[in-house]
Each structure stands twice: as C-alpha cells, then as structure tokens.
Image (cartoon, rainbow, N blue to C red):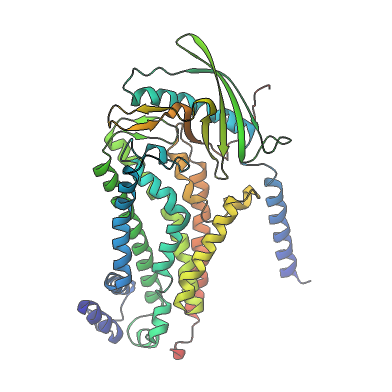
Amino acid sequence: MSITRERGAALATGTIGTNRRAGPATVFGVEMSKLVGQTKVRAVTLVLLLAPWVFILLILHQDRLPLETLYGRYLKTTGFAVPMVVLVSAAQWVFPLLAAFIAGDIFSAEDNHGTFKTILTRSASRNAVFWGKAGAAAVATIALTLLLALSSLLAGLVTVGAEPFITVGSVEVPSMIHSLDMVAVAWLSVLPPLIGFAAIALCVSVLTRISVLGVLVPVVIGLVFQMYTFLNAWDTVRHLLLNWPMNAWRGLLDDPSYAAPFERGLVVSAAYTVVFLAIAYVAFRRRDVKEG
Amino acid sequence: MNRRNRLAASAALATGVALGASACTPDTTRARVENDVPTTFAHAYTLSQQLQGEQPVRPKVTSTECHSSVNIKQDAGPGSWNCDLAYTLDGRKKQVSLLILVDSLGCYQALDGEHRDDTILDKATGATLPDPKVGFDGCYDVYDGRTNVSKG
C-alpha cells in the first residue's frame, strides 16, 4: 500500500524515473498497483478463488446433478466439467459484473478524489492517462477471469479427478493435453466480449464521473441483454448483443466443431469495444480539467 | 431534410430492412435439429458404454424425424421438440423417441421419456450417473445454411 501511495505521489508530481511526463506504461503500472491494493479487489479475488471449490464440494455431497445446465450432468464424471459449468453460469451474470466492477470506477474514482487536475496538469498527458487506465482495466478484468478459470479447473481436478474431458457433442477426449486445451479455448473465447463490457463500463465512468453508475449501468445493460436472450424474439437482434459471443465456445467444443459463432462474435465484440472506447476517449480529451 | 439527415435516414432504413429480412430465418430450424440430434445421440450412446467400461459400439442412425411441439405451423424456434430416431445396433433395428428441449442459444437437452431416470455406474470414478444415452445435451450451428429435412 505504501508503495502505491509513493508511486501515486510520484505520478502526481511527475517525478517517476525521469523529469519527463509519465507515459501510458507508467500510468498502467500505477493503476495496476492501485487496483491490487484495493480491499474490494482483494475481496473479489478471494471469492473467485473459493467459490468453485464450495460449489463442487456441495455438488459432490448431494445426489442430484444440475442437469438443466450444460455440462452439469458430467460434474461427477470428470473434473474438467467444473470449469465448464462455472463458465456457463459466469457468462450469464458474473462476467459483466466483473468487468463493471474493475472498469466502472477507474476514471470516476479520480473525479471523486479530485485528483484529475493534478495528474493532467503536472505529470501525465491525457493520452497517457487514458490508455494507461484503459489497459489496466482490461488486464485486471482478464486476470480475474482467468483466475476464476484456474481455480475452477483445480477444484474439479482435485475433487473429481482428471477423467477425460467430454465435448459438447458427447465425445470423450482421451488426451489430458487436449482436455486442458479445450477448457482453455472455451475460457479464452469469452475474453473479447468481456473487454466489450469493460469498454462500456469505462465509457460510463468517463461520461458520468460517478462510480456507482459506472458499475451499475453495464450490469443493467448485461441484464437487459440476458433478458432479451431468453425471449423468443428476433434472433438477429440477439446475435448483435454482447452476451451472445460469450456462448460461442459451445461451437468450438462441439463434435464436429464450428467456428462461425465465434468469428461473428469477434466482430460484435470489437464493434462494442471500439465504439465505447472512442466515445470515452473523445469525452476525456475534451474534458475541462479546471473543473477538477 | 439536409443531405446528412437523408443519409442517416437511409442508413437506418437499410439497417431496419436487413434486420427484418434476416429475422425471418430462425436460429432453430427443423433441418438443424434433425442434423444434430442423431449425431449427438450416437456419440452419447457410445459414451454411455465407455463410461461403464464396456466395448463401445456406435449405433447407426438410419432415419430421423423431428417436429416442434410449440410452433407447429413453422416447425421452427426454441421450445419443446419431438424426435423419432430409427437406428441399427449390432445388426438389430431399434427405435427411440426423444423429447428435445431447445433453448434460445441453439442448444438443447434431449430426453428419452421412457428411460429418463436410468442410471449407470461410472467405472472410473465409481459414481452413479444419469445414463448419457437417455439424456444428453447438444448444440448446433445457428449460422449454417442447411435446409434438408426428413420426408415426414
């Protein structure tokens, strides 16, 4: 924590390393230190680490399996099913919340503390601050997601065992490496839409300058998307929602596999990310720093 | 209306028409369900034998006919479907009727109504499991252009 304060003070006075103004990499480092030092981030990290273990231990101590959830029927068959069930559940509610939690106040926190004026006028350019903060939000969100993946995988392998992975198309994958590869592919495929949600949160944080809205608005958007997904409404609209690509891994892990949902999901995720980042960037560049 | 507004209106109209036109093709079609269910059924049958430590034999599905129970007119869309499969196993002809519960993500849960509570003993873990061949999950590509359906 003291290191964070020292680095923050150094950033504020522009004395990190050289007498030149801090670049995006320096801002990124400071923001990462600040995130790691936050109690709320540490608490969420602990929850993400423990939740999969609690979940599978509860499942193993009951007779019934969550058959209505994809991979739920295999929870006692292979440990590789645990990260898949966690992924199915997290794609619905947890990922938008996680992205909003990290990115939703990364700009507005400076507004709340009144520190933007000092940073922007004395130590770092707007460009460096924007991209440093955006990079830190993205990396932290991805890191927490992969931590959940790793914790789920370990929980499954330790409590259930490393029996062969079963594809979405009900085919056993005999190789351990191939099994790990498939779990990794599934989790990595949700990162593009996750970044999209982080971009929305970041944009709201810049525009409103209110941390609560930065966290709440992306969660509400994710909720509305999810509600539309469950409606028997226009399928084309559903394909344009940011939660749709979070399910694209099902095609990659099917037998035979198909990549069209993932490829189209990449385009959708990229569109959301670019649009919301652009809006945030323009708004941040035009901001009157004298306001504080 | 100035030029910029006209352009914006044209773009909005074109987007609306494109959305409307593509919205006419549902994600869940009879062709996609009839293509995926027999393949996944055969896989699940083999998986059931593998989990029990038996020599796996893959059933050969000879015919599949699926219909929506919800949208009977269009025979499309999520909800409840019924599939009748005929297959051969070790030279013997068999049949199975499956209830297919399709969700809006292009995935489904298939259940053999007569044996839905059947269980197997997983030889590797010793756990008692729902038999995969009487209850399995599957997904299909909602972007493929497949249109062939059974004659039923």
Above or below B35: residue B87: above
Above or below B145: residue A273: below
Q: Nearer the viewer, residue A59 or A219?
A: A59
Tell me what residue is drawn at x 70 percent, y 44 percent.
B24
Locate residue A155, reporting x and y percent.
28, 47
Tell me what residue is drawn at x 58 percent, y 32 percent.
B33
Res. B151 visible in picture:
yes
Q: Nearer the viewer, residue B51 or A112?
A: B51
Left or right, A137 with reference to B29: left
Asked which quadrant contains residue A116, the reply is bottom left
Asked which quadrant contains residue B12, the reply is bottom right
Locate residue A3, reporting x and y percent.
20, 77
Tell me what residue is drawn at x 24 percent, y 81 percent.
A5
Where is the C terminus of chain A found, in terms of image quarters? Answer: bottom left
Above or below A113: residue A166: above
Left or right, B74 with reference to B104: right
Locate residue A49, reporting x and y percent.
29, 57
Q: State the residue lying farthest toward the bottom.
A: A290
Left or right, A110 with reference to A147: right
Asked which quadrant contains residue A142, the reply is bottom left
